[in-house]
């Protein structure tokens, strides 16, 4: 299954984002525009010679018609560069009361004008005032929650994060941090029942993070980590495989997939994913160690030693000489067992 954030059709996109009333207003606007154009075109002979300003206005209007037809199969109005250009053409095309035989009149009763004015003021106040303030308060509470967590004040951190979600329920970072805290509490909890409750809480929080940001990578990685802690390796592998398919050029995805396969005892399947990580990043040392460990478990110690020697060469090339004794110890260990 695939998803796309846009419908490749502006009317459908308006309906999906803003509901049927928005689509109704859009259709009504287009209908009124074309009705006036058709009605007034009957009063003016076609193909008449026009002065240069009116000709330019007519071309602008035709460009608007073309853009509108194009957006039945596209979504270019979402690009501000296109939208501002169209607004410029629209303003020029309708700069006079009557241009190229098209006339648009908007008339409001005094009561309707007052309602429209107050709605406009309310919208500006919400967008520029209340909406921005809610975002700011949510971010401040999230930062405060981070600081409290680092200080070890877990319950106070949870309260701060919940407060941030009260201001902005779609804040992915707060849900992810709540899940991290629940997972950490589960790992250090001795009582089995309480540990299970923390695991369930972490799963709910990570699930909310994925729900509000389905394309984000970190919430998915958190879910995979949770499955690993709970020993649900098959689920972890399914999630990681899906993440790897989404981001096939990220070598750490293959490294994590190899880690899960190793935990499941599927050692022979570790080699190709570890090699894929190495192919993507020749200096990802963890991938070399993973490949060497898999070769050792498969009884191919000579090949494992060669992999460690390759790691030693990499370490010398980047100047990480303090890590070389660790590699040499692995080489000696394998050679002594041969």
Image (spheres, rainbow, N blue to C red):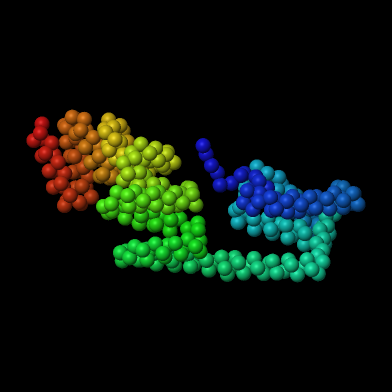
Q: Position of residue 163 (x, y in %)?
A: 46, 64
Q: Is residue 217 left or right of residue 256?
A: right
Quarter of the image with the C terminus in it: top left
Q: Nearer the viewer, residue 274 or 198?
A: 198
- Residue at 73%, 60% in the rendered image: 91
Q: Nearer the viewer, residue 281 or 331?
A: 331
Q: Position of residue 253 (x, y in %)?
A: 36, 42
Q: Position of residue 41 (x, y in %)?
A: 87, 50
Q: Is residue 279 left or right of residue 314?
A: right
Q: Quadrant of residue 299?
A: top left
- Answer above or below: position of 225 versus 105: above
Q: Is residue 78 left or right of residue 194?
A: right
- Residue at 30%, 64% in the rendered image: 152
- Answer above or below: position of 236 versus 99: above
Q: How many marks?
A: 0
Query: Is residue 204 at least partly visible in the picture?
Result: yes
- Residue at 58%, 69% in the rendered image: 129
Query: Is residue 271 at least partly visible in the picture?
Result: no
Q: Position of residue 193 (x, y in %)?
A: 32, 49
- Residue at 51%, 64% in the rendered image: 167
């Amino acid at each position: 299954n695939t998803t796309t954030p846009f419908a490749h059709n502006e009317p459908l996109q308006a309906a999906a984002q803003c509901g049927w009333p928005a689509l109704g207003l859009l259709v009504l606007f287009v209908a009124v525009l074309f009705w006036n154009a058709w009605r007034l075109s009957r009063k003016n002979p076609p193909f008449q010679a026009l002065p240069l300003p009116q000709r330019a206005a007519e071309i602008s209007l035709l460009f608007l018609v073309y853009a509108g037809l194009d957006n039945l199969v596209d979504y270019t109005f979402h690009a501000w560069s296109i939208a501002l250009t169209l607004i410029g053409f629209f303003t020029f095309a309708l700069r006079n009361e009557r241009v190229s035989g098209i006339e648009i009149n908007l008339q409001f009763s005094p009561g309707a004008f007052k309602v429209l004015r107050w709605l406009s003021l309310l919208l500006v106040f919400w967008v520029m005032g209340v909406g921005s303030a809610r975002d700011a308060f949510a971010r401040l509470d999230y930062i405060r929650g981070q600081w409290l967590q680092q200080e070890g004040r877990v319950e106070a951190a949870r309260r701060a994060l919940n407060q941030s979600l009260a201001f902005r329920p779609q804040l992915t970072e707060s849900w992810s941090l709540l899940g991290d805290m629940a997972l950490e509490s589960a790992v250090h909890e001795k009582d089995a029942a309480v540990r299970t409750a923390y695991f369930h809480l972490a799963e709910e929080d990570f699930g909310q993070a994925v729900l509000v940001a389905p394309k984000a990578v970190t919430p998915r990685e958190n879910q995979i980590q949770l499955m690993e802690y709970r020993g649900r390796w098959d689920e972890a592998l399914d999630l990681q495989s899906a993440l790897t398919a989404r981001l096939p050029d990220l070598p750490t995805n293959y490294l994590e997939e190899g880690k899960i396969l190793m935990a499941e005892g599927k050692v022979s399947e570790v080699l190709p994913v570890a090699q894929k990580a190495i192919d993507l990043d020749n200096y990802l040392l963890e991938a070399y160690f993973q490949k060497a460990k898999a070769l050792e478990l498969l009884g191919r110690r000579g090949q494992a030693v060669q992999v460690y020697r390759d790691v030693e060469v990499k370490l010398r090339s980047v100047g990480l000489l303090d890590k070389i004794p660790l590699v040499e110890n692995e080489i000696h260990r394998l050679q002594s067992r041969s």
